[in-house]
Image (cartoon, rainbow, N blue to C red):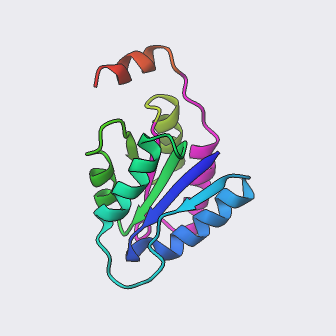
Amino acid sequence: MKVAIGCDHGGIDLKNIVVGVLTDLGHEIDDQGCNSVESFDYPEFAKSVSTLVKEGKCQCGILICGTGIGMSMAANRIPGIRAALCNEMFSAKMSREHNNANILCLGARVIGPGLATEIVRTWMGTDFAGGRHQRRIDMF
């Protein structure tokens, strides 16, 4: 699967770890940046990753900032994007299984690398259940 990934300066270290996890899982990465600890505006990265997902150039995306809140808010402004901020595995699983989330948001200052790794593995390994859940997604 092709995965778009992006972060701001607060998420760069965690992004590098997540890229390693995705690569180990056999996914292709489209890294939209940032690649520096200099201050960057997170909406730019949320938009670039979300656009790749919306246009079908990537099947899903991962966005990382300090809390994950800003990235999720910015990504969810784009029609067709269902970004989920997940801080543990149950939410990661349900965001895919019930809500067909197409972007995972993580907060680098909220969760550590070990938990982030498990969240990414869970999210990437969960399929959408469809059925009544698709009907609900079609409502918005």
**In which quadrant of the rendered view does residue 84 lie?**
top left
Tell me if residue 110 comes above or below residue 25 in the rendering: below
Name the spot of residue 60 as percent of width and height, x first: 52, 45
Q: Tell whether 113 sits left or right of 41.
A: right
Name the spot of residue 103 as percent of width and height, x first: 45, 47
Q: Quadrant of the C terminus?
A: top left
Camera sees residue 86: no
User: From which residue to which does the magenta span run?
Assistant: 101-129
Camera sees residue 73: yes
Tell me if residue 136 comes above or below residue 37 in the rendering: above
Q: Residue at x 29, y 20 (%)?
A: 139
Tell me if residue 110 comes above or below residue 94 in the rendering: below
**In which quadrant of the rendered view does residue 47 lie?**
bottom left
Q: Residue at x 25, y 45 (%)?
A: 77
Q: How many marks?
A: 0
Q: Quadrant of the N terminus?
A: top right
Residue 132: in magenta span: no
Q: Residue at x 52, y 76 (%)?
A: 13
| The furthest residue to the bottom | 38
Name the spot of residue 19 as percent of width and height, x first: 61, 64
Q: Tell whether 73 sits left or right of 97.
A: left
Front residue of 23 and 68: 23
Name the spot of residue 45 as percent of width and height, x first: 37, 63
Residue 127: in magenta span: yes
